[in-house]
Image (spheres, coloured by chain):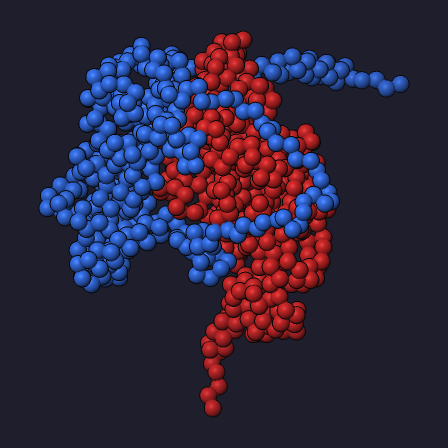
Amino acid sequence: MFRLPKSALALALALFACAAVGASNSQDYQIGTAATAVEIAGWDIDIRADGKGLPVGSGNAINGEESYEIFCASCHGVFGEGEGRWPVLAGGEGTLADDRPVKTVGSYWPYASTLFDYIRRAMPFTAPMSLDDQQVYDITAYVLYLNDLIGEDFELSQDNLAQIKMPNQDGFFVDNRPDVSNPRCMADCADPASLMIQSSLSGITPIGHFVEGADAPASSHSGQHDLEASKEAERKAAITGEQLVSSVAQKNAVMSAEAIAGEATYKVACGVCHDSGLAGAPKLADTDAWLTRLQQGKEILTIHALEGYAGAKGYMPAKGGRADLSDEAVTNAVLFMVESQQ
Amino acid sequence: MATPSTQQLLQTMQGASEHLSTNDRRDFLRRGVSYVAGAAAVGGATLASATGLTSNLPPNEPQWGRQLGTGVVENPYGLPSRHESQVVRRTVPWLTAESISSISMSPLQDLKGIITPNGLVFERYHAGVPDINPDEHRLMIHGLVDNPLIFTMEDLMRFPSVSEIKFIECPANGGMEWRGPQMEALQFTHGMLSCCEWTGVPLKVLLDAAGVQTAGKWILAEGADGAHMSRSIPMEKILDDTLVVYAQNGEMLRPEQGYPLRLLNPGWEGNTSIKWLRRIEVGDQPWHHREETSKYTDLMADGRARRFTFVQECNSVITSPCPENPIVRKGFLEVEGLAWTGRGTIKGVDISFDGGVSWRPAQLKGLVLDKALTRFSLSTQWQGEPWLIQSRAYDDTGYVQPTLAQLREQRGVNSIYHKNSIHTWQVAPTGEVKNVQIT
């Protein structure tokens, strides 16, 4: 007869006891630490449609105008009409059923609270979470004012923001799909003679990777900007009769070593705004826009780049919002931009 | 007469090998598929002249068989062959104002199986890719919970992990073509779509640890990026299958995909799978934030709009042939493609060669998984006949992928999102493939 040694039996019992303890507590993870009220308060930035979460404070459109023009107008337009492909904020009322609807805060957004929430969490685009609550209230009021939803002296606050009835508040309904039912027909499903074939537009997608020379209009955003810049230079040259001189090789010939070194930083950090004109940044290729700035001297421009700057034409966060860049890298990038104008 | 030096011979050989090792199919394409249609002999001759019948072909021993290759850890993190450099994500620059809040597409035309390699997963950022130190990343859970909690990455990886293969698709995939075709490549018509094996923890496990109060019916998920991207998600979804994931395809998430932590709502529009996830608040109603009111709502023809259109409905597309993969040989042809549904599992796919007049069932091949890309295949012969080739998927709810005409009749042409209609490629007698719509 098989006999288990006493010690082994004790061990087996002990193991069984451990397993039992483990099983009874297997879902009791005890992982994570308690979040303190202070920790939660620092991150709890959301505002709900009913106004829950709004900070105590108030603002108005009169005060909001200046902040709007500094932080918002370069992309969204002075009147909320939008620049380039950036979002239109105002107008468009009554267009939602049109062939080309214009979806704005006034014509489309169901809740005013969303405006405060979004500005605070994500705007201005190049420096999110940099505005204080006062500025957010003021800018929110100004955008509502641009949409004729409040008067310019209306004092917007945590008590009345959620009470503002947006024109399209009742224009939404919850998803009711599936909304189509296609039978799984296998034969004679359509009259072959009735098929109309619509061909694709051509020349607007970059397909140079499989059709030689077909990267139209461009395959990258920087390529697109270069294309638009060179078209603009050609247009100006045609008016002034000047010769086009803008090749990179010619620029490099007159650039300092620091400026050449700065080009890499420009591409990864500065180009975001200075290629597109975002936040009122002078575009690299826009020599006219640089003329007045160059008159201040490159020392001043470098200080503005390092420490940040807000002026009538735009807004530049310190180091372009890239605190990780060294002073030398930023300085070299400024030299690259300055010497690109020569 | 001068005898060529060893150096010159080596250079000549190197030159020949360089030339030959370019992917001959690609080379063929670059010079135009319009020459292909004729006899196979024509194609053969063209290929032969392209490669020059140089020394690497039988009966000769190729160059790479007569020398040593590179050693281990030459590339500590391996890279694709240099001959695959065309397999990359691409964007259409005019879709967005710049590249920071923008989108790129996966090269579906080059992918095999159902898994998207990590470097090719489509990108969608609202404020660029943040560079997050995982040691300083935290996930906070608070709101209508008994125990508000903060988790470190180490905490989250102590929970029992699950790994699941799921697709992610942007609801704007195909959204440029509601009014008519304008994208001349599969990568741009359908490439806002990828599928990975994701590893992490079910969100309900984390919420259980925090103790959700009975009034808690929705959560707000928020990212740590500059957009602080936020979406409201109903509790039913979380109890069903929402994950908090930290890995994809066997390695930690790529920065583009939310490193070190993202939400994953399987089968739902991609933007709900918040990347760089830092905060979950439990509430009793949705928040109606910008990305669920101004954006990601579907405008109907009457001017009213659908909201919380979470599900990516059943969809499919043929990936070969397609504009990037024209037919280059007469004879045997395997038609292949991808099908997917956010409501469950693909049950089958039918193929039409005549613009939807008649249909033949395709085979599903490989893994057929819930809310994952599913590959389908149909073997046939092509003898240069013109085709209007389409795929039509159906899922285990009985839903059949609709026609564009059916969608337009219900929704008009301004809804931007959720265009999952049957897609048509026009195959010319030359083998060339164009994007068209049938109306």
At 33% across and 45% down in the image, what residue appears?
A268
Q: Indicate the quadrant where residue A136 lies.
A: top left
At 21% across and 36% down in the image, what residue appears?
A314
Q: From the image, which quarter does the N terminus of chain A lie in?
A: top right
Q: Is residue B116 left or right of residue A46?
A: right
Q: Colour of chain A?
A: blue
In this view, B327 is above or below B152: below
Q: From the image, which quarter does the C terminus of chain A lie in?
A: bottom left
Circle count = 0
Q: Residue furthest right?
A: A1
In this view, B110 is above or below A124: below
User: Could you say which is closer to the camera, residue B263 or residue A69?
Assistant: A69
Q: Colour of chain B?
A: red
At 26% across and 35% down in the image, what residue appears?
A77
| Image spot of residue B269 (x, y percent) | 52, 31
| Residue B44 in sight from this viewpoint | no
| Image spot of residue A29 (x, y percent) | 56, 17
| Residue A205 in sight from this viewpoint | yes
| Image spot of residue A154 (x, y percent) | 24, 15
User: Could you say which is closer to the camera, residue B304 or residue B30?
Assistant: B304
At 56% across and 63% down in the image, what residue appears?
B33
Q: Residue furthest bottom?
A: B1
Q: Indicate the quadrant where residue A58 lies.
A: top left
User: Could you say which is closer to the camera, residue A115 or residue A55?
Assistant: A115
| Image spot of residue B265 (x, y percent) | 55, 28
